[in-house]
Image (cartoon, helix red, strand yellow):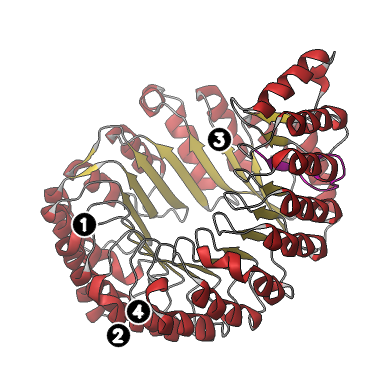
Amino acid sequence: MDETSYAVRMLNFATNLREPLDWTFVSQNADTSNIFADAERVAIKVSASISPNIDRLLRFSETIRSSHTISSVRLYGMDYTEIIKEPRIIPVLAEALRSAKSLRKLTLDADLSSNLLNLLVKLLGPESDIQVSLRLCRGENKLTTQHIEILRRIHSLCRLRVHRIRIDAAAFSDSLRDDWPGLCSLTLTDSELDAEGAKAIGGVLEKVAPGLQTLDLSQDHLDDSGITAIVEGLLRAYSRTEEKRGALRKLSLPDNCINSDGWIQVAKLVKSNPHLTRIDMSHNNIGSAGTAFGDSLQSCAATLKKLLLTVCRLDERAVIAVSRSLAGSCSLSILDIACSRLKNSAEAMRTFAQELIAGSKSLEDLDISRNYLDEPGIKELVEGLMKNNSLKKVDLSYNNGVGAEITPMIEAILHLKLQELNLRSCSIDDEGGKALGKFVALSSSLRHLDVSYNKLHTDGAKAISVGVAQSCSLERLRIESNELGDEGARCVAEWVIRRSKTLQVLDISTSGKGAEGAKAVAKAIMDVAGNTTLKEIYLDEDGELGVQVLNVMESIPNLQNSHIGLLF
């Protein structure tokens, strides 16, 4: 169905709705979007995303002006230099934006240039209530005083994202002497801020802090002194408000070489922002500041939804403090503490399992991979999982103790509506494979299962394959890098490839299949081609299975009609 037919059909459908319908319509064709200009009878809000040339932009300007439905427009891939030279475009587009009946948001993705910023100033007058979001990348490669002065003249600028553009410290220090009250989101990523740059950013944040809701300084090489300067700027701003606190909702500071002293500053910032919903501190060494940071989470425990602490080297005190601050949370839905030090402390693991996992009422996504938990640690985890009722995704990969405790673990999670389970490299043998096979068959929600890089042989492969054939939900199975042998490969061919009713992606690469097993898999793939739910099968690049599949493929005429993608 082409875009125009689809748009007309959608409008006809929306006509019969009693309530307004939010709909994002992404169109490469401005003519298609004109359909919505006359759709006043429909209660529908439309977001149009176009990559226009000048003629198309002129036509689309008329659509924006007259439409009662388009609420958001995103422009990308435009040559702003050429547009500014075109005498027709600025007055037409400026009038369209001023008189738009429903437009509330304008987003531009572009290279940094003075031409772009000057264009915005001309298009948007001081009385405009259209929210502007800018995403600047590359281009002139340096945000200068001139750029910032122009940005300040865009009164409705609310979101600014700068990626891989060097910051001119003097530009920030000299240009932002007054408040910038409209800015609610500031993203400066991969910008290699030095000490002066960080100090300048702190000065900027002191001006915009009262209304700032999103702060993303990912991969800026801040280190402890840099984050200290930034936090101090924010805290000075908060001290001047009546509430003495900030409005931050999202805080992202991953991969910034922040150590103990910097983490203590982050803890102060977290305490001052009780409405935080997302914190990302991944790839920063927490050192001895674990207790201070963990305790600070109590201030936002009622609102925090996502906490990412990947590769932060959490020690015993940090894990215990985080667990107790978030115990019984009704908001936390995503927790990532991969590559921590849970293995090193029985008390930390016990507190984590019994207070955080067992006590959480909202946790859906848990990643504790690469903690290398042994059997005692997994036993503690099992106790916590038995009391949890909310988890949907669990990543336990690279925890060797899972293999010995897989049967009680499966019993502990049977009541959960798990959608994804990652057990990569968990030392699971054939007995564990049998328990997993029963779980796959019984679960009505499991969509993704990863049992790659384990110790599965024929019996384990058969049990899991039979479970997959009986499953009513599994869509993706990774069983690569196990020693399946010929008989195990035949089981995969017979039960998974031929009989699965739901599986879409299968990875059986480097699984120790002999020539006979490879032939069975190859024949099964060809037999079901065009009559299966499978879309992708990952095979050995140079292994026996890859050779056998190619041999069979060459012998079948009209193979291009096959609907299976074979990835070598």
Q: Please name the residue that numbered disc 1 is placed on.
A: 222
| Residue 447: quarter of image | bottom right
Task: Say which element carries label 4.
Answer: helix
The amino acid on which the numbered mark 1 sits, given as a three-letter code, is Leu
The magenta span reads 496-508
Q: Main secondary structure of the magenta part?
A: loop
In front: label 2 or label 1: 1
For marks 4 and 3 on the same chain, the one whose residue lies earlier in the sequence = 3
In front: label 4 or label 1: 4
Q: CA distance from mark 2 to mark 1?
A: 30 Å
| Residue 94: quarter of image | top left
Q: Nearer the viewer, residue 421 or 161?
A: 421
Task: Say which element carries label 2.
Answer: loop
Q: Please name the residue that numbered disc 4 is placed on.
A: 316
**34 sits left or right of 376 in the view:** right
Q: Nearer the viewer, residue 349 or 389?
A: 349
Rendered location of residue 174, percent (x, y): 12, 53
Instruction: Determine if residue 316 is in view.
Output: yes
Q: CA distance from mark 4 to mark 3?
A: 59 Å
Q: Please name the residue that numbered disc 3 is placed on.
A: 61
Rendered location of residue 164, percent (x, y): 30, 41
For marks 4 and 1 on the same chain, the one whose residue lies earlier in the sequence = 1
Q: Residues within 10 Å of mark 2 (few under 14, many from 20)?
A: few
Q: Are marks 2 and 1 in contact (CB under 8 Å)?
A: no
The amino acid on which the numbered mark 3 sits, given as a three-letter code, is Ser
